[in-house]
């Protein structure tokens, strides 16, 4: 149902012909927005994506920050992408995407002088034998955990990736495991990472591999629900590894853009949406900051943050008071500092086992993580930060000249401490830690850029102070509590507006499921056939958000 056309600024600053009306307007060309756009376009809808920045991709972008060195600006490793039904269904490999892997997946030195850091290798026997060497029985424990993972992973993903409440996944898990084991699994998934690590393994090495992986979300290792991220990432590391796109993260976005365009979706950059106009309980148009309006025939998908959608884009008359009240308590993830390095040679790790891994968890063992979290919880800029460290040329040699390394580190500041001076202070501490674990590191750095929380947010409004996951991943803001109690689905208080970003269930990470859930909900709720669903959603919303 394409509308009459007008002129607007195009993707590369060009002037393009664009519709003044569309079946669906997608606000934001992050990967979730692009997934939604592709699905709606495939269904025959006329789709326009309006993106505030000059390039699509959101937090999936790369750039040549130093001549000859490609740096991923935000996300870098994509185990969730290859596992995700939303991205698998788009067959991005047919649209230019090529995956590659580091020779080994992830490692975690136990202390600065550790010259024998534990590593997850691609081969299960190698990982298990190495863990067995360190602690009798941990090799078998690793194998048993992995065997169970292979049995349940499809059902587990179906559960975790479904809008709330999940139905098919839990039923599958019950069938596969029986009720007693399914209950035990549910219990395991709710454990704090520290407790989970102690239950699953006897030795420090295996435990630490789980703990470091749990730190990819902002849930402290002693908080309920922090274990699940660690469990998923170690199992995915063992299963398919953590792939990266050949040529940089931007290649994933490029493939998504190509794929969305196949169905006819139009992507217009440099158009920041300022308002959604609502009339009669439905979105009828969106307006950008330049004052241009696109009329909406069917649906709006917001790949924006939840606070931005409810607190700014929707008119106040369209947002129930209860939602406004709840979103005052919305909790962002801890601020992020990211540092990109160009090195003239490989990283001089003390532990040679780290030379081949894509990701290194650096700076803390179990107690160190607790102390680091204590800093973050007491507004203290850490002197001894824990960090995630990516060796991108090790993962994909095309990222920099042979024999060199394009690398990054990212770590967190305390909530509420996101100023540039604190970020710079933390950046100096990161370099000190890296020099301890890899003596001589600093001397090999020939280029370095810092992305402070303010830089991250300026380059993508969803990254509030660098928030990695669109809002905290703590249990109290997940599932039916995401983004606020009573939600847990893409549907919003306006019947044809859907939240399709990481701010919606199931949350952060490059899996595209938030965009898929939003597109599916929009398709199911559309037209006369969607009336019963719209009615049901309205009833549920009025019950849960009054
Ligand atoms: C430093 C960092 C490292 C990460 N590492 C990984 C990783 O290795 N693996 C992984 O799976 N995940 C990782 N993540 C998380 C992952 O990148 C995000 O969860 C994911 O990108 C969220 O996708 P999204 O589409 O919801 O939002 P985004 O990617 O943030 O995209 C949102 C888009 O919407 C646009 N937008 C917002 N508001 C408006 C508006 N009003 N008008 C128009 N456009 C608007 C933004 O400009 C942006 O382009 C990382 C994140 C960060 C910040």
Image (cartoon, rainbow, N blue to C red):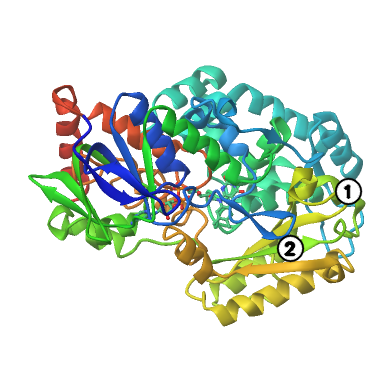
Is residue 526 depicted above or below 476 in this figure?
Answer: above
User: What is the distance, in whole Å, between disc 2 and disc 1 at their CAs?
Assistant: 21 Å
Q: For the residue carrying disc 1, how many other residues have a C-alpha within 10 Å: few (<14), some (14-19), or many (20+)?
A: some
Can residue 536 be seen here? The reply is: yes
- Residue drawn at 21 percent across, 55 percent down: 314
Q: Which residue is mark 2?
A: 341
- Single out the residue that lies furthest toward the bottom: 421
- In the rendered image of this protein, does residue 464 appear above or below residue 140? below
Pointer 2 or 1: first along the chain: 2
Quarter-of-image position of residue 523: top left
Label 1, secondary structure: give it. Answer: helix
Q: Which mark is residue 353?
A: 1
Q: Which mark is residue 274?
A: none
Are dots 2 and 1 in contact, CB under 8 Å?
A: no
34 vs 365, left or right, is left
Q: Residue placed farthest to the front in the image?
A: 15
Q: Residue lying furthest left in this view?
A: 280
**Is residue 386 toward the left or the right of residue 298 in the image?**
right
| Residue 134, percent from left and from top | 89, 45
Task: Report the number of numbered marks.
Answer: 2
Characterize the local packing of mark 2: few (<14), some (14-19) or many (20 or more) Cα atoms within 10 angstroms: many
Does residue 145 appear in this view? no
Position in image of residue 161 (x %, y %): 46, 34
Where is residue 525 shown, x and y percent of the image?
22, 30
Q: Which of the two marks, 2 or 1, is nearer to us in this view? A: 2
Question: Residue at 28% across / 46% down in the picture?
Answer: 486
Question: Is the C-beta of the residue carrying label 1 under 8 Å from the nearest atom of ligand 1?
Answer: no
- Foreground residue, 249 or 153? 249
Secondary structure under the numbered disc 2 in the rendered image: strand
x%, y% of residue 280? 7, 45
Q: Residue at x 16, y 39 (%)?
A: 538
């Amino acid at each position: 149902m394409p509308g009459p056309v007008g002129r607007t600024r195009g993707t590369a600053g060009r002037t393009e012909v664009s519709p003044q009306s569309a079946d669906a307007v997608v606000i934001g060309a992050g990967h979730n927005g692009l997934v939604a756009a592709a699905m709606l376009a495939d269904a025959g809808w006329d789709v326009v994506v309006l993106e505030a920045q000059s390039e699509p991709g959101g937090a999936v972008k790369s750039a040549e920050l130093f001549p000859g060195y490609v740096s991923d600006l935000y996300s870098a490793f994509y185990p969730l992408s290859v596992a995700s039904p939303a991205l698998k269904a788009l067959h991005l490999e047919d649209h230019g995407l090529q995956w590659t892997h580091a020779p080994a997946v992830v490692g975690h030195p136990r202390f600065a002088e550790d010259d024998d850091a534990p590593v997850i290798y691609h081969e299960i026997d190698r990982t298990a034998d190495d863990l067995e060497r360190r602690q009798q029985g941990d090799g078998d424990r690793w194998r048993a955990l992995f065997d169970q993972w292979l049995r349940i992973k499809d059902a587990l993903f179906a559960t975790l990736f479904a809008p709330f409440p999940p139905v098919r996944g839990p039923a599958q898990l019950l069938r596969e495991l029986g009720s007693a084991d399914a209950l035990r699994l549910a219990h395991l998934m709710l454990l704090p990472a520290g407790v989970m690590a102690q239950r699953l393994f006897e030795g420090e090495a295996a435990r630490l591999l789980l703990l470091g992986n749990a730190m990819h979300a902002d849930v402290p290792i002693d908080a309920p629900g922090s274990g699940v991220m660690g469990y998923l990432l170690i199992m995915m590391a063992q299963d398919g590894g953590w792939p990266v796109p050949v040529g940089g993260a931007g290649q994933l976005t490029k493939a998504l853009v190509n794929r969305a365009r196949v169905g006819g979706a139009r992507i217009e950059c440099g158009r920041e949406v300022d308002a959604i106009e609502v009339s009669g309980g439905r979105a009828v148009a969106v307006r950008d900051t330049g004052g241009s309006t696109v009329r909406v025939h069917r649906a709006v998908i917001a790949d924006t943050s939840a606070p931005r959608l409810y607190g700014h884009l929707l008119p106040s008359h369209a947002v129930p008071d209860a939602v406004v009240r709840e979103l005052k308590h919305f909790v962002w993830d801890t601020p992020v500092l990211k540092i990109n390095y160009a090195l003239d040679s490989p990283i001089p790790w003390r532990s040679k086992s780290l030379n081949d891994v894509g990701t290194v968890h650096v700076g803390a063992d179990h107690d160190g993580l607790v102390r680091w979290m204590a800093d973050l919880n007491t507004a203290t800029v850490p002197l001894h930060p824990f960090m995630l460290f990516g060796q991108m040329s090790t993962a994909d040699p095309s990222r920099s000249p042979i024999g060199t390394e394009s690398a990054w580190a990212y770590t967190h500041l305390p909530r509420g401490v996101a100023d540039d001076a604190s970020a710079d202070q933390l950046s100096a501490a990161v370099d000190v830690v890296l020099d301890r674990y890899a003596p001589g590191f600093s001397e090999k750095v020939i280029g370095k850029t810092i992305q402070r929380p303010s830089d991250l947010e300026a380059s993508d409004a969803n990254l509030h102070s660098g928030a990695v996951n669109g809002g905290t991943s703590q249990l109290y803001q997940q599932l039916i509590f995401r983004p606020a109690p009573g939600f847990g689905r893409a549907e919003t208080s306006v019947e044809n507006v859907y939240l399709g970003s990481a701010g919606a269930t199931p949350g952060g990470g490059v899996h595209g499921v938030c965009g898929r859930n939003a597109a599916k909900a929009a398709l199911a709720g559309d037209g006369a056939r969607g009336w019963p669903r719209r009615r049901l959603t309205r009833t549920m919303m009025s019950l849960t958000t009054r």
